[in-house]
Amino acid sequence: METSSLRKEKFGTVLGLAPGNVPAYSCDYQSASDEDLPTRKAYRSEINGVYLGHKWQCVEFARRWLYLHHGYVFDDIAMAHDIFRLTSVLHVADKKRLPLHSFKNGCKRHPTAGSLLIYEEGGEFEMTGHVAVITEVSEQFVRLAEQNVGDWRWPEGCNYSRQIKAMVTDDGDYWLECSFGDATILGWVMQTDDASEAEIIEAPPPELFNLQANRANIQQTKRNRAWLNMANADEAAYVAMMKGHRLAASGQDDLFYIASETAMAELQRASNELHALYMHATEYVLKDDSLLRYFNIPEVLWSRIRQSWNNRRNQMITGRFDFSLSEKGLKTYEYNCDSAACYMETGKVQGRWAKHFACNIGANPGKQLHKCLRKAWKNSDVDGLIHIMQDDDPEETYHALFMREAMEEAGIPSKILYGVEGLNWAPDGSIVDADGTRIRRVWKTWAWETALNQIREECNNDAAQLERYQPGEPHSGSPRLVDVLLRGDVMVYEPLWTLIPSNKAISPVLWQLFPEYSYLLESAFELTASLTASGYAIKPIVGRGGANITLLNQQDKVMASTKGKFDSQDQIYQQFFPLPRIAEQYVQVSTFTVAGRYAGASVRIDPTPVIGMNSDCLCLRVVEDDHFLRMF
């Protein structure tokens, strides 16, 4: 089809009708009307209470077409290309599972009308991949119905959006030509009981998921030589905090860990999928006051959090998942959407360490993290000076400087504030720094919970006072942290809504929404028989650095317990799933997201089963599977 003369239609315009009179809509977000779509909720597509996806993306159309034609839907997925890995669909009426099979482009099993055509991520479909419904099949072509490709009207009188060339070889192999030169067709997906010629999605050898410990051969001369650049402010601050050029404060400076490519691919997939599930659960919580109460957030802030979600859903910059990884499985403990901890160690220090000590095994999984941060800031809505607010703490200093480097490389000027000293009220009620510069945008190292605690303390935890509290309003005293972060005219990163996915009360909600999901641990607000049978962890809904966590085994014996300042917080119960112990250290893998996508990984170690504030962040290297299996 000639596309150069085609015109994009306004968001929501009907582009055409697929067989069965299923409409396809324009997904041109730039033309979306804030008046017609004032909130994030307005972008949800539902029929009869069945969630179908985000208007009007390709996944939404495919799920809606299947539901209207057959009454079943495929599960929530992070990206369109993930549909190729699904093995079943859910028949909505009777909640039964039906088999789903995938067939590679070029296989002998030809697609049929109603099959889903799946594109790999990359090129035209960078990161997401794409899904289209096949509406007609011949040996020369297939015709497709879809959304979010071109956003122009379908050919006159046609019930399909485009046609692509097909070819059948002498051996009966069915090939489809990709009409986008930089994209790749994975194949087609069909709901069928007949699995002949289908892709067999075999589980990789379990030993590929066991991290391995190794030690660098560090010569004494190199050990004593500087290897971080003291001319770089963030590296100098890191050296000052660590009291030397070293990666580990515990004396484990020669220790590093190795993961297989398969394990890292699974971590990347898990991070992307889990981010999508956490976002789904966040929206679910914000729609239900009874759930939101579990998060122990002052009710006076609920409307602000909802407003933040509706208006700033896509403005999250950083996030960190904490995982247990071994042949026993891959499980996440939590998602830290309100913390910058370990970003510099992952994105810069572990690479510098490996280079200095000639640790040439495999690849550095943190190599792209700084680049991803630069890109995220460049694509953010920051169009002027951003104030970086940090506590007067050595660790927060190098975190702030590392992030400032990414901001300024993205063309965003910044200014670091230490604490709130020097802040003043301007005559118009705004807040200015010591130089008189108005604070309009903030990136903070503080957790949002710190601001909430200021509110609680000011109101003496009195419910009536909390109800009347006006956050961010001018008062007679000097501006406090809460006054800056909760002002309507100050844009804060991370957005206020990140309080929800960062709070461990999200874990029972996730388990309720996605029970038995492979990367999640069973979690509940009350202790259940199944948790007692498996062993469980008791965690405060809000906590940092592994504080106030108790681990109990199946006999209710305490395995480990940590102290901290969060003992007054409400708690959740989570399935006990221990960290692997390797080289006499408990090892946790952390993956980092930037703008909601996987961006890097590293490991943290501790001699105790709970990773805490003082646990070391060590170097992680990634090697090819064959190499990994030969090494050990």
Image (tube, grey):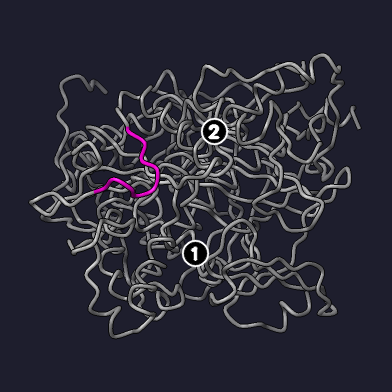
Vertical comparison of 632 with 35: above or below? above
Helix, strand or loop under label 2: strand
Residue 86: x and y in percent read: 58, 51
Count residues near mark 2 (Cα–Cα under 10 Å), then give few for <14, some for 14-19, many for 20+: many
- Mark 1, secondary structure of its residue: loop
- Of residues 604 and 563, the one nearer the viewer is 563
* Foreground of the two, 392 or 75: 392
Q: Nearer the viewer, mark 1 or mark 2?
A: 1
Disc on the earlier residue, 1 or 2: 2
Quadrant in the picture for residue 630: top right
Q: Which residue is nearer to you in this view: 571 or 143?
A: 571
Q: Amino acid at mark 1?
A: Asn
Q: Position of residue 327 (x, y in %)?
A: 81, 49
Q: Using the image as rendered, state which of residue 248 and residue 335 is in the foreground.
A: 248
Instruction: Give me the residue at 43% from left, 65% from top.
Output: 71
Q: CA distance from mark 1 to mark 2?
A: 38 Å
Name the residue carrying label 1.
503
Residue at 35% over, 84% down: 462
Q: Quadrant of residue 449?
A: bottom left
Q: Report the span colored magenta.
A: 415-423
Q: Given the image, on which type of amino acid does mark 2 rest? A: Leu
Question: Is 420 part of what is drawn in magenta?
Answer: yes
Quarter of the rendering occupied by the N terminus: top left
Which label is found at residue 186?
A: 2
Q: Which residue is rendered at x = 55% and y = 40% of the image?
A: 394
Residue at 64%, 63% (x, y): give it. 547
Residue 501 makes an appearance in the image: yes
Q: Is residue 632 left or right of residue 79?
A: right
Question: In screen coordinates, is 329 left or right of 55?
Answer: right
Answer left or right for 70 relative to 365: left
